[in-house]
Image: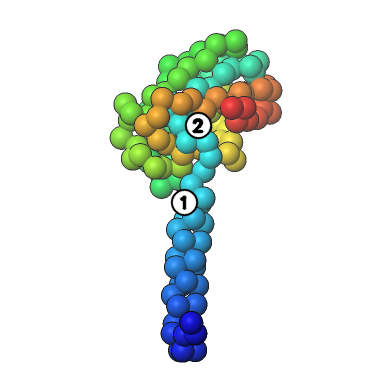
């Protein structure tokens, strides 16, 4: 059985349009930072006392944790904050009597029970904050 060329062409255009829509949806979904987590933990492996807040890419920020020394960590459960689900978030670390640092790596906020862990290493004015898992 043969089909008129205009029907075949219309079917091909419809298929291409559906594929383009799926590709656009996939690229929008992939624009969200990975991993997707509910909690942010920051481990203090640095030579100073520190605290941190969590900031979202839209500018919203939580209050700071309490201060804590080397070899300790604090965790912020994002469900207890005003940050909206789906936000790209990252910690902002404050060294007591030192500098403030923000890592380049964002994670996304999902209510899924998962935790992103960042490690802080260095000294008061020369340190880094790295996403480790």
As displayed, is residue 46 above or below residue 12?
above
Taking the spot 47% from the left edge, 51% from the top edge, the residue there is 29
The image shows residue 20 at horizontal and vertical percentages of 49, 68
130 or 37: nearer the viewer = 37
Residue wearing tag 1: 29
Q: In which quarter of the image is residue 47?
A: top right
As displayed, is residue 47 above or below residue 61?
above
Q: Which quarter shows the C terminus? A: top right
Taking the spot 45% from the left edge, 20% from the top edge, the residue there is 75
Q: Does the image show residue 36?
A: yes
Q: Quadrant of residue 112?
A: top left
The image shows residue 21 at horizontal and vertical percentages of 45, 65
The image shows residue 65 at horizontal and vertical percentages of 42, 21
18 or 127: nearer the viewer = 18
Q: Which mark's residue is nearer the viewer, 2 or 1?
A: 1
Q: Does the image show residue 98?
A: no
The image shows residue 109 at horizontal and vertical percentages of 42, 36
Tag 2 secondary structure: strand
Taking the spot 49% from the left edge, 66% from the top edge, the residue there is 19
Q: Which numbered disc, 2 or 1, marks the residue that appears first in the sequence?
A: 1
Q: What scheme was used to colour the molecule?
A: rainbow
Tag 1 secondary structure: helix
Mark 2–mark 1 distance (CA, rounded to whole Å): 23 Å
Residue wearing tag 2: 91
As displayed, is residue 11 above or below residue 32?
below
Taking the spot 50% from the left edge, 22% from the top edge, the residue there is 41
61 or 26: nearer the viewer = 26
Residue 61 horizontal side relative to residue 99, left or right: left
> Is the residue marked by circle 2 packed among few (<14), some (14-19), or many (20+) residues within 10 Å?
many
């Amino acid at each position: 059985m043969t089909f008129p060329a205009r029907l075949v062409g219309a079917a091909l255009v419809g298929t291409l349009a559906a594929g383009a829509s799926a590709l656009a949806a996939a690229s929008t979904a992939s624009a969200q930072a990975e991993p997707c987590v509910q909690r942010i933990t920051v481990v203090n492996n640095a030579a100073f006392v520190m605290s941190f807040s969590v900031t979202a890419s839209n500018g919203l920020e939580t209050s700071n944790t309490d201060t804590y020394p080397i070899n300790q960590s604090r965790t912020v459960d994002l469900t207890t904050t005003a940050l909206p689900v789906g936000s790209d978030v990252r910690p902002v670390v404050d060294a007591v009597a030192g500098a403030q640092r923000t890592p380049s790596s964002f994670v996304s906020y999902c209510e899924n029970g998962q935790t992103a862990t960042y490690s802080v290493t260095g000294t008061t004015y020369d340190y880094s904050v790295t996403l480790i898992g």
